Amino acid sequence: MPATNSSADRYRITSVQDLLRFLLICFIWLACIVLAIFFIYRSIINYPETYKVPEFNVTGAQLNRLNYTETNHTLSYNLALNITLTNPNKKIFFKLTDTQVIAYHQNKRFGLVTLMDRQTLFDQNPKSSSDFNNAVIQGWKPMMFEEPMLPNADLYNIDVVIAFREKGGGLSGQVICNLKLPLSFNGTAWNCYKTTKCSKVFYYWGS
Ligand SMILES: *[C@@H]1O[C@H](CO)[C@@H](O)[C@H](O)[C@H]1NC(C)=O
Ligand SMILES: *[C@@H]1O[C@H](CO)[C@@H](O)[C@H](O)[C@H]1NC(C)=O
Ligand SMILES: *[C@@H]1O[C@H](CO)[C@@H](O)[C@H](O)[C@H]1NC(C)=O
Ligand SMILES: *[C@@H]1O[C@H](CO)[C@@H](O)[C@H](O)[C@H]1NC(C)=O
Ligand SMILES: *[C@@H]1O[C@H](CO)[C@@H](O)[C@H](O)[C@H]1NC(C)=O
């Protein structure tokens, strides 16, 4: 048989060994194709969901009292909040525990309310929201402010930090909501003009 470069000749089946080699090549090709289809299927159909963090929004706020007494440096406060928690994931559940809402004025923490304590386990299903209505931060606290606190300001800057924890060493984090609120007299409700989207401060994994 004359030597030739043509591929047709190279793959021409002339002996049992050639036949076996041909079948082996076919088998390897088939295995590659099956593997490729498997991985494409895995990545399209069964793609693992990227984790989305819990979203908190303040949907209503009412500042019933924010009264600073200069003589004894005491702040007396009452702030009612409506907060929504959203799980934006398609399949992942949130199991929240130990979640607190902490209020600051002029970067000084003055009060807090607990939405879920360490004993509570709160399930938030995928693609769903929960409302926490009338979470009230109230009390009094001796404290000093750097800037004088005007008794009749139009708007007060209140920063609300929501610190949450997932059960079992999952995600922990804090979100901050910057509110500008007027004092509400005689308990008249003041709702945010639009829902206050809270920005993310930090998240970390572990307990
Ligand atoms: C809360 O804010 C997010 C954006 O951070 C928005 O997608 C979502 O619709 C808001 N939820 C409510 C109940 O307003
Ligand atoms: C919170 O929601 C409740 C029920 O929708 C409403 O009656 C109340 O006025 C709201 N409070 C604030 C502070 O927005
Ligand atoms: C603030 O406290 C002072 C002294 O207790 C009181 O006279 C005043 O009415 C209070 N103001 C408001 C807006 O509650
Ligand atoms: C501070 O002074 C105000 C006004 O006199 C009073 O209402 C309040 O009880 C005092 N607070 C404390 C902690 O003594
Ligand atoms: C608050 O209530 C008092 C007494 O009930 C009333 O005189 C006053 O006008 C009310 N203020 C507002 C802003 O509604």
Image: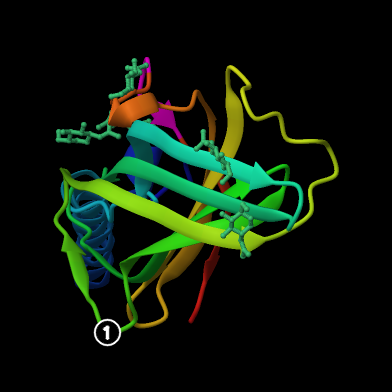
Q: Which amino acid lies under the numbered mark 1 shown in the image of this protein?
A: Gln
Q: Which residue is mark 1?
A: 119
Instruction: Classify the position of ligand 4 by quadrant: top left, top right, bottom left or bottom right.
Output: bottom right
Measured as percent of width and height from the top left, residue 172 is found at 47, 67
Res 89 seen here: no
Q: Reply above or below: 191 against 83.
A: above
Q: Looking at the image, which residue is at 22% across and 43% down?
A: 44
Toward which corner of the image does residue 66 lie, by quadrant? top right
Residue 16 drawn in magenta = no
Q: Reply above or below: 122 against 3.
A: below
Q: Reply above or below: 195 against 62.
A: above
Q: Looking at the image, which residue is at 32% across and 39% down?
A: 8
Look at the numbered disc 1 and give the secondary structure of its residue: loop
Measured as percent of width and height from the top left, residue 170 is found at 40, 73
Res 95 seen here: yes
Q: Looking at the image, which residue is at 38% across and 48% down?
A: 10
